[in-house]
Image: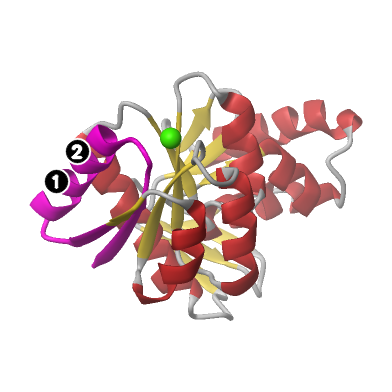
Amino acid sequence: MDVLIVEDDDAMASALDAAVVSAGHMASRVARGADALLEHRRFEVILLDLGLPDMDGLDVLRKLRQVTTVPILILTARDDERSVVLGLRSGADDYLVKPVKLVELLARIEAVTRRAGRSKDIRQRNIVLGELQVDVERRVAAIGPQVLPLTATEFDLLALLASHAGSVVTREQILDALWGDAFLASSRSLDVHLTGLRAKLKMPGFIINIRGVGYRVEADSA
Ligand code: CA
């Protein structure tokens, strides 16, 4: 895989480069947002630092999203939840907190590229994650032969999370997708539906809570 590293900190960029190459991928580095916009086309994954010298990384992200669906992982400083949420809402597939752990970097690269491959099948009527099957067209979810007795909202929630398996879905994205608006009143009811869904799935640890950001279903955890 060809990975573009957009990072102005030379030591950080070198470490990322070495990690990516050690996993058998190819890596290229640029330090400026403008160069990322110029050179993104030949890459299959982009690692994007948000603090760049020439422009705001979030602006780079938004500009990239106007022209490409390439998986983009944002790199943020520790505890910068606001940037993470803004980045995910602006079209990033996932995020990594610095200092980036090698194992996590590689796992996230694998996950977002798998998801990108799946979503190329635009219809995606049937999502399969291990034992779990979500038939989006018939609105039926099952674990093995056993159909889950989900409410309409629980089904929508599961379908949304499962279709983004491997990536974080923010609370705002869920509220927006299920209720048409990320208005405050729905936030608590999301918790209720989520609790109901988890109880019926009986798959502890399947829906991972990403504190302050949203939720993630692992692509290969089911
Ligand atoms: Ca930086």
Which region shows up in magenta? 1-28
Q: Nearer the viewer, residue 170 or 89?
A: 89
> Residue 82 falls in which quadrant of the image?
top right
Q: Which numbered circle lies on residue 15?
A: 2
Q: Nearer the viewer, residue 20 or 184?
A: 20
Q: Where's residue 21, x and y in %?
A: 13, 54
Judge left or right: residue 95 versus residue 18: right
Judge left or right: residue 69 versus residue 180: left
Q: Where's residue 127, x and y in %?
A: 49, 66
7 is within the stretch colored magenta = yes
Q: Nearer the viewer, residue 147 or 57?
A: 57
Q: Are marks 1 and 2 in contact (CB under 8 Å)?
A: yes
Q: Identify residue for label 1.
A: 18
Identify which amino acid the numbered label 2 is placed on.
Ala
Identify which amino acid the numbered label 1 is placed on.
Ala
Q: How many marks?
A: 2
Which residue does the image show at 14% across and 46% down from the upper left? Answer: 18
Q: Residue furthest top?
A: 79
